[in-house]
Amino acid sequence: MRQVVRYLALAVALSGIVIPVLAQPRQTQPVQLNKLSDRLYEVVGGSGARGGAYIGDDAVLLIDSKMDKASVDQALSAVKAVTDKSIKYLVNTHGDGDHIRGNQYMPATITVIAQENCRKEFFLPGREGKPSEWTNPDLSRFVPSVTFHDRMDIYLGSKKVELWSFGTGHTTGDTVVYFPGEKTAFIGDQVFVGRVPLIHAYKGGNTLEQVKTLRRMLTTLDGATTFCTGHSDPIDRNGVLQHITAMEARQAKVRDLVKQGKTLDEVKASFSSGEAGLIEIIWNEVQKTNTSKTNG
Ligand SMILES: [Zn+2]
């Protein structure tokens, strides 16, 4: 019996982490800084998505927070190794666990900033309906306490960091953190490289909106040359464009097949099996657009 209980406990423990862990490489690499400039670093490795660290004149700003204490501790000491300035701000690019779970292991003195919808998403139940851990009052100080709607500037002494929300995409609360001096933007999970893009439709993410959002980003940040994503090496403008055109090609093909009267299963069958989830999301979006057109 004890064996069974132990097994069950293990199964429950595992079931809680299966999704985020699968999103990461199997072997967790130690957290490291990837130098982009004298001030700007990517924070790679550990458990959770890639993030960033920016050293201003008087303080440090972090982007995203990994997802366990060991990774946060490693990230903090990696930052300490390159600057003696203290960490003042943490910006969450969106509300997914692999970008925000580590918030709770950050120094309690930091200010957490996010787009207003991202803050709301902190409190949403998970995909399987599990209540959000952020409803726990002990964690409340690690939930974003400063939010913005479409624009915010943060000054670290003379250095300006721009926060932008260009609209819905991967989620409803995606933030682009732009460093004009470096011509570099941290864009969270708005673009995936070498794997099928993830769109969180269950919390409002939308592919039709995402392509508009990303085009708006490229037009607005017309000087940006480098885009750091949550799960790949940095890309250039062309990398973002490739994501947009691949997504638009999927949308056009789904629209076409729907027009031909194909069922969802038939539509899915004309894409690779790995894309089934994304194709179902696009299918639902196309159906909705068609219904709203018919209704006037
Ligand atoms: Zn994500």
Image (cartoon, rainbow, N blue to C red):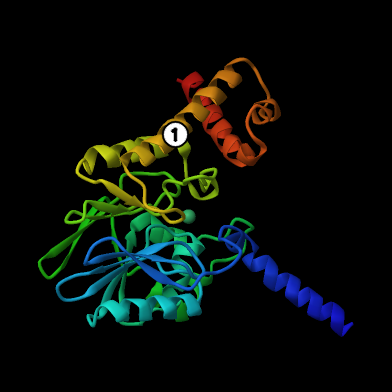
What residue occupies the far top of the structure in this picture?
260
Specify the quadrant that holds the C terminus. Answer: top left
Query: Position of 224 compared to 282: left or right?
Result: left
Numbered label tally = 1
Specify the quadrant that holds the N terminus. Answer: bottom right
Q: Is mark 1 within 8 Å of ligand 1?
A: no
Residue at which label 1 appears? 208
Query: Position of 99 compared to 146: left or right?
Result: right
Taking the spot 86% from the left edge, 77% from the top edge, the residue there is 4
Q: Position of residue 194 (x, y in %)?
A: 51, 45
When the figure is inspected, residue 228 is found, relative to residue 239, above or below; the finding is below
Query: Position of 81 compared to 140: left or right?
Result: left
Label 1's element? helix
- In which quadrant of the rendered view does residue 268 lie? top right
| Residue 165 in sight from this viewpoint | yes
Looking at the picture, tell me which residue is in the foreground, 90 or 286: 90
Query: Position of 147 compared to 207: left or right?
Result: left
Taking the spot 69% from the left edge, 66% from the top edge, the residue there is 15
When the figure is inspected, residue 58 is found, relative to residue 251, above or below; the finding is below
Q: Position of residue 225 (x, y in %)?
A: 26, 46
Graded by Cα atoms within 10 Å as few (under 14), some (14 to 19) or many (20 or more), the crowding at tag 1 reads some
- In which quadrant of the rendered view does residue 99 lie? bottom left
Looking at the picture, tell me which residue is in the foreground, 295 or 104: 104
What residue occupies the far right of the structure in this picture?
1
When the figure is inspected, residue 259 is found, relative to residue 204, above or below; the finding is above
Q: Position of residue 6 (x, y in %)?
A: 79, 80
| Residue 209 in sight from this viewpoint | no
**Amino acid type at image mark 1:** Leu
Looking at the picture, tell me which residue is in the foreground, 143 or 58: 58
Looking at the picture, tell me which residue is in the foreground, 31 or 157: 31
Q: Position of residue 67 (x, y in %)?
A: 49, 70
